[in-house]
């Protein structure tokens, strides 16, 4: 399903950003508690997890209703795509 591919892509991007953030913090030898980098990285990883969970919930809802969800029901028109949010 399209939403599952979208969710996996979004989750991979979030995890990649978390990895880059952690690497940057280590390479700059910043104290994690002061910089807030570990907390931000955890937030990005949590967001990746939630994206995957939402995709699974949408899949389960589609299976129980017997319908394939359309793009309009998966992404409200008032929410910009991930590329626009970055």
Image: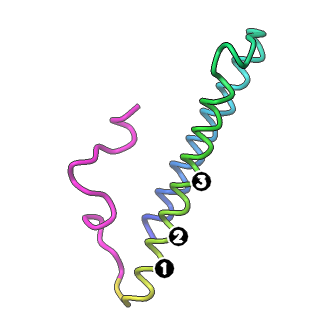
Residue under the image location 43 percent in, 64 percent down = 3
List the residue tagged with mark 1. 60
Check the image and report above or below for 5 versus 46.
Answer: below
Q: Secondary structure at mark 1?
A: helix
* Residue 81: numbered disc: none
- State yes or no: residue 37 in magenta: no
The coloring applied to the image is rainbow
Magenta range is 68-86
Q: Quadrant of the C terminus?
A: top left
Check the image and report above or below for 16 versus 53.
Answer: above
State the image coordinates of residue 55 (x, y, percent, origin top left).
48, 65
Residue under the image location 34 percent in, 85 percent down = 67
List the residue tagged with mark 2. 56
Check the image and report above or below for 61 versus 35.
Answer: below
- State yes or no: residue 72 in magenta: yes
State the image coordinates of residue 54 (x, y, percent, origin top left).
48, 63
Check the image and report above or below for 57 versus 43.
Answer: below
Of marks 2 and 3, which one's residue comes earlier in the chain? 3
List the residue tagged with mark 3. 49
Q: Is residue 60 left or right of residue 67?
A: right
State the image coordinates of residue 52 (x, y, percent, origin top left).
55, 59
Q: Are marks 2 and 1 in contact (CB under 8 Å)?
A: yes
- CA gap between label 3 and label 1 equals 17 Å
Of marks 3 and 1, which one's residue comes earlier in the chain? 3
Q: Secondary structure at mark 3?
A: helix
- CA gap between label 2 and label 1 equals 6 Å
Residue under the image location 62 percent in, 43 percent down = 45
Q: Determine crowd level at label 2: few under 14, some 14-19, many 20+ residues with C-alpha closer than 10 A.
A: some
Q: Observer-nearest residue: 9 or 27?
A: 27
State the image coordinates of residue 60 (x, y, percent, origin top left).
48, 79
- CA gap between label 2 and label 3 equals 11 Å
The picture quadrant where one finds residue 15 is top right
């Amino acid at each position: 399903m399209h939403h599952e591919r979208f969710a996996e892509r979004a989750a991979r991007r979030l995890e990649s950003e978390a990895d880059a953030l952690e690497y940057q913090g280590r390479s700059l030898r910043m104290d994690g508690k002061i910089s807030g980098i570990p907390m931000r990285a955890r937030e990005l990883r949590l967001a990746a997890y939630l994206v995957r969970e939402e995709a699974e919930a949408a899949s389960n809802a589609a299976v129980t209703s017997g319908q394939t969800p359309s793009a309009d029901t998966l992404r409200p028109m008032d929410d910009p795509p991930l590329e626009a949010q970055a």
